Amino acid sequence: MYYNFFLIYLTFGCAIMRCMIEIFIVIAFVVFGIAVSIALHELGHMIPAKLFKVPVSEYFIGFGPTLLSRKIGETVYGVKAILLGGYTKIIGMFPQKPAGYTDKYFAKTIEPVREETLVGVTPENEHRVFYNLSMPKKMIVMAGGTLTNLFLGFLCFLVAFTFIGGYSSSTTLRSVVKCESQVGSSTSSNDECSSNYSPAQKAGLKAGDKIVAVNNQRVESFSKIAAAISSSSSSKIKLSVKKSGSSKAEDITVDAVKVAGTYKIGILPELIKRRLSAFETLKLTKTIIVQTIDAVVSMPVTLVETVNSIITGHRRNGGLVSVVGLGQVAIAQDKASRNAAEKIAGMFSIMGSLNVGLFVLNLIPLLPLDGGHFVNALYEGTKRGIYRLQKKPRPGPSDLARSMPLAYLVYGLLILLCVVSVVADIVNPVV
């Protein structure tokens, strides 16, 4: 008896240990992926800066206490304790204060930042510092990090969908949502409905049915089916369906319901595993970029919805996701994966989405984001060109330090987004 109990206890303990190890590996991969993504982003800034002879004083991965560091040439390279950040300290990001100028407002905010970025500027190297670069060189230095994330995103998707392969949604139905209250959910349930049946259930759609057209428009993928339904001008939607086992299509009218402002009928697609070509992965990356841009543009609305979900406990449909949420998604995806290849593809897919997110976020033309420096370089170059045409002396660099109050406001908004998303992921997770 005790022997059997010991075996059961040991088996149960091993199962828990295996689960814990898998979760640890997933979290470690996410943290490592974030660290590598940010480290390479900063490397994308540092390499062109060094190619243009700009002095770089520090290159660190992570933040917090320094674990190790070493000075090579004029740059200190190192690793800090918390591997969720990183920075490259390029000398002279902000120029000297214009002669005779006095900061009337926010002097206590502007002056320390200006002084910090000028540490290391000497009469011998001033001609090399960042603020004296030409417009094209400044743009290359600032675009280097952002484009690195774009390339990493595509590379991760290439590993996930081209080298390993993944599942794509077909036009054949895997299942039909039974109840109207479940329409919009990513899963179906066999529970009896306490309310109305879903539109698809009412129309007689079943697993194995294949949708070939929506409102007389041919559809080749489930995404096109969903798009055609959600963009319909009426709730009455005409479907051309090949019933399971039949080769002939028949027309069915479905009375759709609105969920979060778009029409849905309650169908889930059958998943087919295949490898995408490199060109298909490139197109997929473009689609994800567009979707990410839409998400960034709608961020104010999403922030309000996320706060509301924290207060009310209503189910979140995506929205803001923090590092905590990213780990939760990775763990859920890992559990849903059927084999090691799927697990690896899932991890690389998440890292690809993260890098695309960093790419899009840094396109925002506001300091302290890369887009703010990029736009300033464009402004300076345009101004110099106009002065050249007017045969005026070359103007000095823009006094970017004066924009620091706005940069701190952007910092504050980013911190607010981080705090709200972390709280939401803890009290009301997406998965």
Image: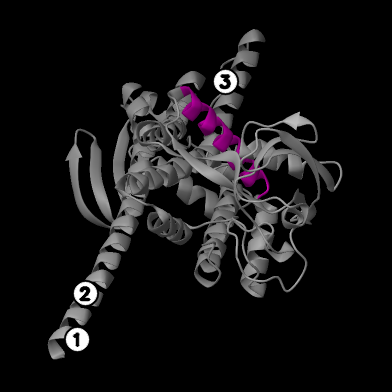
Q: Report the residue at 72% width, 34% height from top.
A: 249
Mark positioned earlier in the residue sequence (2 or 3)? 2
Q: Earlier in the sequence, mark 3 or mark 1?
A: 1
Q: Nearer the viewer, mark 3 or mark 1?
A: 1
Residue nearest the observer in this picture, 418 or 272: 272
User: Which residue extends farthest left?
Assistant: 3
Total number of numbered discs in the rendering:
3
Distance CA(mark 3)–CA(mark 1): 77 Å
Which label lies toward us, 2 or 3? 2
SS at mark 1 in the image: helix
Which residue in the structure is indicated by mark 1?
5
Q: Which residue has dot 3 on it? A: 381
Of the numbered discs in the image, which one, if any, rests on residue 364?
A: none
Residue named by callout 2: 11
| Residues at discs 1 and 2 in contact (Cβ within 8 Å) | no
Q: Identify whether 361 is placed above or below 54.
A: below
Q: Quadrant of residue 227?
A: top right
> For residue 15, what is the image quadrant?
bottom left
| Vertical side of 181 occupied by 2: above or below | below
Mark pair 1, 2: CA separation: 10 Å
